[in-house]
Amino acid sequence: MNNHFTVHEIRRGAYYDSIVLMQLQKALVDLPGVVDAGVVMATPANKDVLRSTGFDLTGIDAKPDDLLLIVKGESEVTSANALSQVDELLKQRRSSGAAGTYRPKSLKAAVKALPEAEWVLVSVPGKYAAGVAEEALDLGQNVFLYSDNVSLKDEISLKSKAVEKGLLLMGPDCGTAIINGVGLGFANRVRRGNIGVVAASGTGLQAVAVGIHNRDRGISQAIGTGGRDLKAGVDGRTVLQAIATLKEDPETEVIVLISKPPEPALVSRLMHALKATGKPCVVNLLGYPSPGRSLGNIHFATSLDHSAELAIQLSNTHHPIPITYHPPPILNPLPSTSYVRGLFSGGTLAYETVLALQNFLNPLFTNVPIRPEQQIKDVWRSQAHTIIDMGEDDFTQGRLHPMMDQDLRLRRLRQEVEDEQVGFIMLDVVLGEGAHDDPAEELRQALAILRSKRPELRVACLVIGTDTDPQNTAEQIEKLEAVGAQVYRTVDDMVAAVFMQIIAEPPFSHPVNFDTAELAAINVGVETFFDSLQGQGAKVLQIDWRPPAGGNEKMMALLAKLKSKS
Amino acid sequence: MNNHFTVHEIRRGAYYDSIVLMQLQKALVDLPGVVDAGVVMATPANKDVLRSTGFDLTGIDAKPDDLLLIVKGESEVTSANALSQVDELLKQRRSSGAAGTYRPKSLKAAVKALPEAEWVLVSVPGKYAAGVAEEALDLGQNVFLYSDNVSLKDEISLKSKAVEKGLLLMGPDCGTAIINGVGLGFANRVRRGNIGVVAASGTGLQAVAVGIHNRDRGISQAIGTGGRDLKAGVDGRTVLQAIATLKEDPETEVIVLISKPPEPALVSRLMHALKATGKPCVVNLLGYPSPGRSLGNIHFATSLDHSAELAIQLSNTHHPIPITYHPPPILNPLPSTSYVRGLFSGGTLAYETVLALQNFLNPLFTNVPIRPEQQIKDVWRSQAHTIIDMGEDDFTQGRLHPMMDQDLRLRRLRQEVEDEQVGFIMLDVVLGEGAHDDPAEELRQALAILRSKRPELRVACLVIGTDTDPQNTAEQIEKLEAVGAQVYRTVDDMVAAVFMQIIAEPPFSHPVNFDTAELAAINVGVETFFDSLQGQGAKVLQIDWRPPAGGNEKMMALLAKLKSKS
């Protein structure tokens, strides 16, 4: 359709920090005459993305370890020109505070240079991560292992070593923690307090911490464990360490545990470990059937936000917070032909959304399925109602997490809007340390363009943030509301709003009338029921019932035959 | 071991009301010199029970439709003598209030005699029940179908007819309802109020109604539907009718829905139907993963008692009830070699108990399994920790429900106590209309004998009852406490108490110490994490990390080999 010219360059085996790649790609796109650009490690997934967003990769022989630079411009000269500026742009990239400081080349040297260090954060590519983490443990360091794509075998061996050494290994794929008031990885700025959190779920931990802070209470410690910690093999090694740690922590008066459903056999260990803390505990194993309302000191919550509220109620027994009922808002119904699509950066936020939507939207597809039939066939293409967690491996190999880099999400957003069947879009905006410094601005620009094409489209944004987060939560919300987005602060509120906007299939039933003030009944069978009705003042008649044909089966069959013929 | 003499009599094709059979059996056992007696329809299950409790049935050729009378006495004369009194005893049986009144022989005649009748209660044996229910519908009557052993096909056809005619058919196997203030079947006496209940679960409905009454609030209508109403095929016909009915009922301000997990495809219909009521709703689908805390006007409860409390909070928005935390009692631990056994008369009470216990007792077996591996092999014999719902078909064919007749439960209780591995026994006592008029007295006598043999045995009794129930709940509790039973009023409280008494397997983990006030860390990878830590005031060092061997896989493998050899 357009006469665009594409040029590319391959840098074999080149390693760059993902931040650098993201910044370079943005810088290339901003050059005059450039239509689009890609700067990615040439993994199959990343090449798929390029293809699906309009790049022709025919004849480009780049391997997963190669850096692929590709530029689409208005003319061949423009494109080539852009590409020639890559090295210059790399030099100009936003310099981190680390750039000017002493940067040791090895962990050993770093520990010597900062002897009070107790923590090592590891976010190198997955295939290198286990090695770095092991070295850190051997140097007596606790490890925050942000990297994903680490094998289960490596996870088990790293965690066994950590437990032996009395060290904590959070992760792999651990996105967040708050230790001694400092956020590691993605972490909202929340006040300190008496509630400790353990979470095998990154945005689960964030949503609970935010829920606590936004209710004017605080966090003692918040320990991430990696999403696989409660799977068979890993056996909750980090979760159990974390519970034991919060048990001993004098600042922690209430413990919250958040996870997707654990291996059922592990639940018993968790319950006994939580009981042994002797502290009030709140548990939300999203999607796991609740054992009940509570078990001794353990209370079961039904949502992330409910976990935050229950924790506060338990932390503050002298001033219980009453639960009040707010009638839900009446919203204009959405035409039932419309599909709902959700593009999430927070995995647990996506999961909790599926947990709710599956009960009123059909068919529902997702890459974080709760029931097998919900598994989406092609993560790059939505079908019917679709919820996508864009923090899953498919979308993060060789690139930053969508909380930092929204490029893929913005591309997918355009794709969704082109689908005329889509009537409602859900997006999450996770603020805090480590996250993009102005995600709402990028969304605002994209939504403004999309709105001009599809003014009737409804957009809901879930903003997870506090009043002290570096991005300024209030401003982020303003930007989103300025382009007509509905803004919600909890998954509970967002899914309820979707529910209230979706037209119901009409329930097929009519009311039955039992208006008469006094009940009158006929009893056939057990005579005590006659006595009971009479005792309650009802009018009642007992039938002197006998089995038809004296209970003779052959005779009964004969009678039934005669009756059906008559 | 004993020289007992057994005699029997078979009455071919004889029909007696189950109440009569129970009373006759008790009368026979009470005769001098009689050791034990059985008066049962000779179904395979009933013959199994007789055999397992010490009757020799060799050579007795009785068929399911035959009444089998069997007496074990101290001498042949005693036994024969007892048996000869059967007809005399049958005449003396407690006469129902119905005995002296006009008892029409047919439904048609009954409707003529009581033209204001709107309800027919059907509790004849399963194979006759569908026919009677259909006749009642054809006569324009709503039906309370207590009978079990009615086919799914018959249920669907009966309910289709009912919906067509604008009539309500509750059941089959519907144990309870409260219509216009009158309890049908098993029903606690509760005050009238503004909360309407729909339940595909008999004792679930009772527990919620009791929870509401015991918190000083009341019930508008409580509609049972039969436990299969939310299964595929039946498709919630009665539940949807009931919801539509409570929607229109001006007395009903809050709606509670209780069920075991429905067919997933039906959940969406339920949600839309509840939304359409426009009233605050409480849902507890026991064991179904909670969709969250709430969806618009629909609030999700985590236990039967929680459902009652939430309903009250929603019904009374001006005076919300604060939730307060009571630290659980510290109880002496039970030796971990002990097994827990539960013998329940209430199916939903058994199910809710399994839902909790499965999270801390392993292995757990039951005839109301939540996970397939929990299915008990032989319902007549406990293994490891076991929960038995004695209201299931195996135990009720041709005999009364255990809420009326505890004979089988008392026999099973003796069997459990003989097992030295058993350390804890759970029993439920469901009071109210239709139930046994003094269940605690029977249990007290049995427990007093058992306690003398096993004084260390712990017994927990769950008493579901109100201060207005005909049995006098306070007296029932006193009788149970007099023989040292722990008495609880909700499943929540009972399972928490069991949990607190069971010794934990020691969790294998040790706390990690992160005492240092200021966090110091080393960052390997994504540089924004360095900036974030520094910005939060932590001491941090960034490593100038490069992939080992420049990322060359072959070189890396070689390096790893060399390292492992060194």
Image (cartoon, coloured by chain):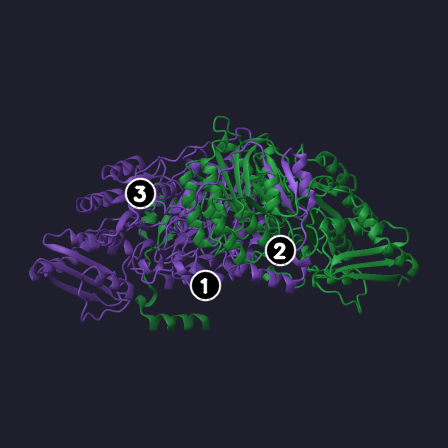
Chain colours: A purple, B green
* Closer to the camera in the image, A43 or B194: B194
Q: Which residue is drawn at 71% across and 45% down?
A: B460
Q: Is mark 1 on a helix, strand or loop?
A: helix
Indicate the amino acid at tag 2.
Tyr
Label 2 – label 1 distance at C-alpha? 59 Å
Q: In which quarter of the image is residue B384?
A: bottom right
Is A185 situated left or right of A234 in this image? Answer: left
Q: Quadrant of residue A133?
A: bottom left
Q: What element carries label 2?
A: helix
Q: Where is residue B335 in the image (x, y as percent from the top left)?
A: 72, 52
Q: Is residue A277 at all visible to an observer of this figure?
A: no
Neighbourhood count class around disc 2 (C-alpha, 10 Å): few under 14, some 14–19, many 20 upward = some
Q: Of discs 2 and 1, which sits in the foreground?
A: 2
Label 3 – label 1 distance at C-alpha? 34 Å
Q: Which residue is labeled 1 in the image?
A: A152
Q: Which residue is labeled 3 in the image?
A: A461
Indicate the amino acid at tag 3.
Cys
- Point out which mark residue B128 bears: 2
Q: CB atoms at circles 2 and 1 under 8 Å apart?
A: no
Is A541 situated left or right of A498 in this image? Answer: right
Q: Which residue is drawn at 56% across and 53% down?
A: A267
Q: Identify the subunit bearing mark 2.
A: B
* Closer to the camera in the image, A379 or A227: A379
Q: Residue at x 7, y 60 (%)?
A: A75
Pointer 3 or 1: first along the chain = 1
* Closer to the camera in the image, A499 or A159: A499
Does B209 sit above or below residue B148?
A: above
Q: CB atoms at circles 3 and 2 under 8 Å apart?
A: no
